[in-house]
Image (cartoon, rainbow, N blue to C red):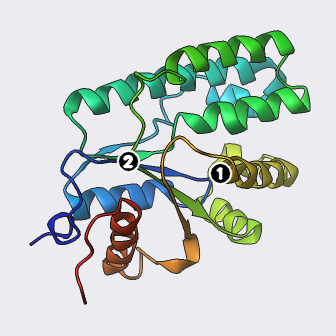
């Protein structure tokens, strides 16, 4: 019996992993997909034509970046549900408007006109009864210090050059965002509660929590 059957996770479930940069979304996404025998939906960072430009000039490229992400995430959401579910998704479409676009608007690196245009597009796509929301959103959280250590460890040049104030701002905004999130059930997991690098079996603890959040029958130990 695999872990999906053991914890009675439906074959068509869609589980989204959210959290700020550096918390290990891709790692846990792949681990969950392997354990549950689901497909993955990974964020395509390396193919993004605006990302490097954005990190060098927030004001010039923030709107372009957010529109690109919104379009790509919407297409991916549509693809997931056309497959009939059975996916673990790295990062949600909700974070784009609730955190990134709003942060740039508040800080003056996105104009009012651009922000309102972006919000109108987001609402037209997502804020309807026809848009399929995930069964559970797993929110990976940790201290700012732990997250900065992970960002430093993975060593992406564009992230290393970003001022620490940006990561501080993002950390706070993520906490504010998740505290107000209501689109689907939320499972909060601290990044120090498991270690998939040292112990691959620790993913079972995460799956058990997912099953409980989805109100699935959890096996007695």
Q: From this viewpoint, which residue is outermost toward the bottom?
A: 221
Q: Horizontal and vertical percent for residue 61?
A: 73, 20
Q: Horizontal and vertical percent for residue 85?
A: 25, 39
Whether residue 3 sits left or right of residue 184 in the image: it is: left
Q: Which mark is residue 135?
A: 2
Q: Nearer the viewer, residue 31 or 219?
A: 219
Q: Nearer the viewer, residue 164 or 3?
A: 3
- Quarter of the picture containing the C terminus is bottom left
Whether residue 44 sits left or right of residue 106 in the image: it is: left
Figure disc tally: 2
Whether residue 196 sits left or right of residue 59 in the image: it is: left
Q: Residue at x 50, y 36 (%)?
A: 46
Q: Which residue is mark 1?
A: 178
Q: From this viewpoint, which residue is outermost toward the left?
A: 1
Q: Nearer the viewer, residue 105 or 162?
A: 105
Cα–Cα span, label 2 and label 1: 16 Å
Q: Horizontal and vertical percent for residue 14?
A: 33, 45
In this rendering, the answer to whether 128 lies above or below 51 is above
Q: Residue at x 30, y 27 (%)?
A: 79
């Amino acid at each position: 019996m695999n872990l999906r059957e053991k914890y009675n996770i439906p074959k068509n479930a869609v589980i989204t992993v959210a959290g700020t940069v550096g918390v290990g979304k891709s790692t846990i996404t792949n681990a969950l997909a392997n354990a549950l025998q689901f497909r993955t939906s990974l964020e395509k960072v390396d193919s993004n034509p605006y990302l490097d430009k954005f990190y060098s000039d927030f004001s010039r490229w923030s709107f372009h970046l957010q529109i690109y992400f919104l379009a790509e995430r919407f297409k991916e959401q549509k693809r997931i549900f056309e497959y009939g579910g059975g996916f673990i998704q790295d990062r949600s479409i909700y974070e784009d408007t609730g955190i990134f676009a709003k942060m740039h608007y508040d800080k003056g690196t996105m104009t009012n006109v651009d922000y309102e245009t972006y919000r109108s597009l987001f609402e037209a796509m997502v804020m309807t009864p026809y848009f399929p929301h995930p069964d559970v959103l797993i929110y990976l959280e940790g201290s700012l210090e732990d997250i900065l250590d992970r960002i430093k460890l993975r060593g992406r040049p564009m992230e290393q050059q970003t001022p620490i104030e940006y990561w501080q701002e993002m950390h706070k905004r993520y906490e504010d965002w998740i505290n107000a999130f209501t689109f689907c059930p939320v499972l909060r997991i601290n990044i120090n509660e498991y270690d998939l690098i040292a112990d691959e079996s620790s993913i079972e603890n995460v799956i058990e929590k997912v099953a409980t959040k989805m109100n699935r029958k959890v096996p007695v130990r």
